Image (tube, rainbow, N blue to C red):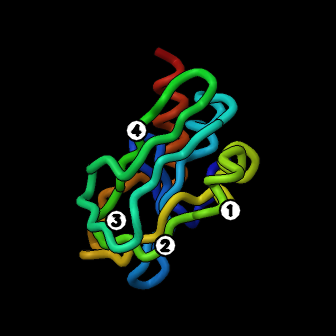
Amino acid sequence: MYPVELQYTKDHEWLRVDESTGTIGITDHAQKELGDIVYVELPKDGERMTAKETLGSVESVKAVSDVYSPVSGQVVAVNSKLQDKPELINTDPYGEGWLVRLRLTDPREAEGLMSSEEYEAYVQGKAAH
């Protein structure tokens, strides 16, 4: 259900690591919970992020939710398409709906994140309570 090449957080962010760069977005589960996304606030190029720090927010018709950086690094790209089309997060959360790319400070930080199977179990367990 969740792409196996990604890693996940308990706050429903995903991370794709390509060598020293990490792409971050929110999971399909998160976008479904939020509903129609109408606005996205993201950091600026060059900003430094620390793991578990707020990197921006996603506003839907239901709520505003903070998005946290799963790893530390420097912002090297921001998905500017989301300014005009925030709904890309709803329609393609793992592709066109990515949020930011970071140059990773320490790629080993990603080792503490959940696998696809662990995240799916986490989401199912949380829904069962």
- Tell me residue 125's x, y (percent): 48, 27
Which is in the foreground here, disc 2 or disc 3?
2
Question: Height in image: 71 above or below 125?
Answer: below
Q: Earlier in the sequence, mark 4 or mark 2?
A: 4
Spatial separation of the CA atoms under disc 4 and disc 3? 20 Å
Q: Residue at x 54, y 34 (%)?
A: 59
Query: On the image, which quarter does residue 75 sit in?
Result: bottom left
**Residue 95: image tag:** 1
Horizontal arrangement in the rendering, residue 95 relative to residue 62 (left or right): right
Q: Residue at x 56, y 37 (%)?
A: 30
Which is in the foreground here, disc 4 or disc 3?
4
Query: Quick one: SS at disc 2?
Result: strand
Q: Residue at x 55, y 41 (%)?
A: 120
Which is in the foreground here, disc 1 or disc 2?
2
The residue beneath circle 4 is: 66
Spatial separation of the CA atoms under disc 1 and disc 2? 15 Å
Spatial separation of the CA atoms under disc 4 and disc 2? 19 Å
- Tell me residue 107's x, y (percent): 31, 75
Question: Height in image: 124 above or below 31?
Answer: above
Query: On the image, which quarter does residue 35 sit in?
Result: top right
Q: How many labels were placed on the picture?
A: 4
The residue beneath circle 2 is: 77
